[in-house]
Amino acid sequence: MTKEYMESLEAIVDQLTLAAVLEMLERISHKKAENLRNHWKDETSAKLWDKAARQIEQINIDI
């Protein structure tokens, strides 16, 4: 990771909230899993993205 990416991500978290960013990451992960299943027929990778989404969902941030 570069410093530039870290600063960009920090700015997004500052502008929104950490909870909002995590929720978006969860949704993105589910969408990636769906895309891998439907368009690439890659169930193995889809399962990994689904797992990531579930793990993100379990993080309960109230900041």
Image: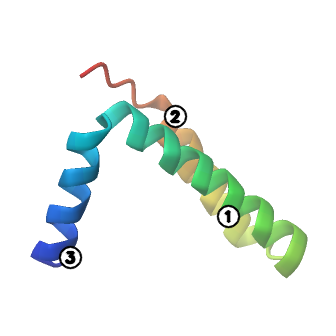
Whole-angstrom CA distance, mark 3 to mark 1, is 21 Å
- Amino acid type, mark 2: Glu
- Amino acid type, mark 1: Lys
Residue density around tag 3, few if under 14, some if 14–19, many if 20 or more, within 10 Å: few
> Mark 3 vs mark 1: which is more N-terminal?
3
The label shown at residue 57 is 2
Residue 32 sits in which quadrant? Answer: bottom right
Residue at 52% over, 34% down: 57
The label shown at residue 32 is 1
Could you tell whether 59 is left or right of 41 in the image?
Answer: left
The label shown at residue 1 is 3
Residue 18 image offset from top left, x and y in percent: 30, 36
Residue 38 image offset from top left, x and y in percent: 89, 69
Which of the two residues, 45 or 6, is positioned nearer the viewer here?
A: 6
The label shown at residue 45 is none
> Mark 3 vs mark 2: which is more N-terminal?
3
Could you tell whether 31 is left or right of 60 in the image?
Answer: right
- Amino acid type, mark 3: Met
Could you tell whether 8 is left or right of 58 in the image?
Answer: left
Circles 1 and 2: CB distance less than 8 Å?
Answer: no
Whole-angstrom CA distance, mark 3 to mark 2, is 23 Å
Residue 39 sits in which quadrant? Answer: bottom right
